[in-house]
Image (cartoon, grey):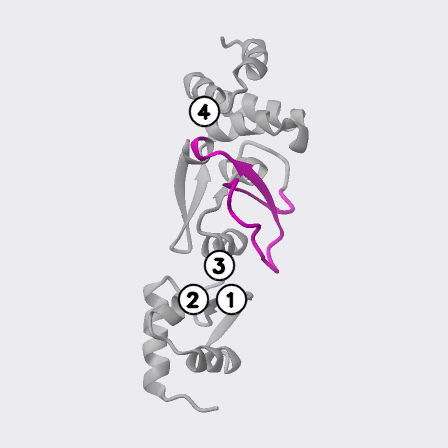
Amino acid sequence: MYVSNNKIEDAVRIFKEHQGVMRTAEALDTGISPRTLYYMRDEGYLTQLERGVYQLQDKEPLSNPDLVIVARKIPDAVVCLISALDLHNITDDIPHKVHIALPRTSRNPTLDYPPVNVYRFSDKTLKGGVETKEFDGISVKVFNPAKTIADCFKFRNQIGLDVAIEALKRGINEGKASYNDIVKYAKLCKVERVIKPYLEAIGHG
């Protein structure tokens, strides 16, 4: 299979316009042909990060490939719970999977890598407290510290109450989440009565 240098140069330029990482569907939408895409993969111009996600070979290795792949493959996903705590540096737990929030009505994602834990959120709780962080030029949606703490109490049976309590203490003591914001998101997540005793125990409320 042969592809002209002009087509390869055009494809490289398009990839660079997308921070060097694209899904197959995105590449095809920009006019890169399947023939060109697979030729570039086979000839080493592209690295396949995950099925259907490619990175330009001359780019520096991704600083957080798991989150970049999730953001590219599952655009609706919001990084949550232990993965969000880890990003905000308010837990000592190391997430072995990427914890993501998705709408209750969406399909289960199909990813070969990285492994993900999917949590279903209502529309209101999915939209509350979302912020964007950039990794390697790719925007990744993540819940802010206060919303993440409230979510941890909501999903305490899945992740452990001890994780939620530690995040609450560190979030407040390290100035990453205010009392008012935590209460606001606790109301949104309907865990205000659950979280209040722990707030009082650390001198708030």
- Frontmost residue, 175 versus 148: 148
Query: Mark 1 belongs to which amino acid?
Result: Gly
- Tell whether label 1 touches label 2 (CB within 8 Å): yes
Mark 3 crowdedness (10 Å alpha carbons): few <14, some 14-19, many ≥20: some
Residue 177 image label: 4
* The stretch drawn in magenta includes residue 102: yes
Which segment is the magenta one?
Answer: 95-124
Residue 103: give x, y in percent of width and height: 49, 41
Up the image or down, 146 lies above or below 97; here it is above
Instruction: Tell me the element at label 3.
Output: loop
Looking at marks 2 and 3 on the same chain, the residue that comes earlier in the sequence is marked by 2
Looking at marks 4 and 2 on the same chain, the residue that comes earlier in the sequence is marked by 2
In space, the residues marked 4 and 1 are separated at their CA atoms by: 37 Å
Residue 164: give x, y in percent of width and height: 60, 26
Residue 62 image label: 3
Residue 52 image label: 1
- Frontmost residue, 135 versus 129: 129
| Residue located at (49% from left, 8% from top) | 205
* The stretch drawn in magenta includes residue 57: no
Residue 25 image label: 2
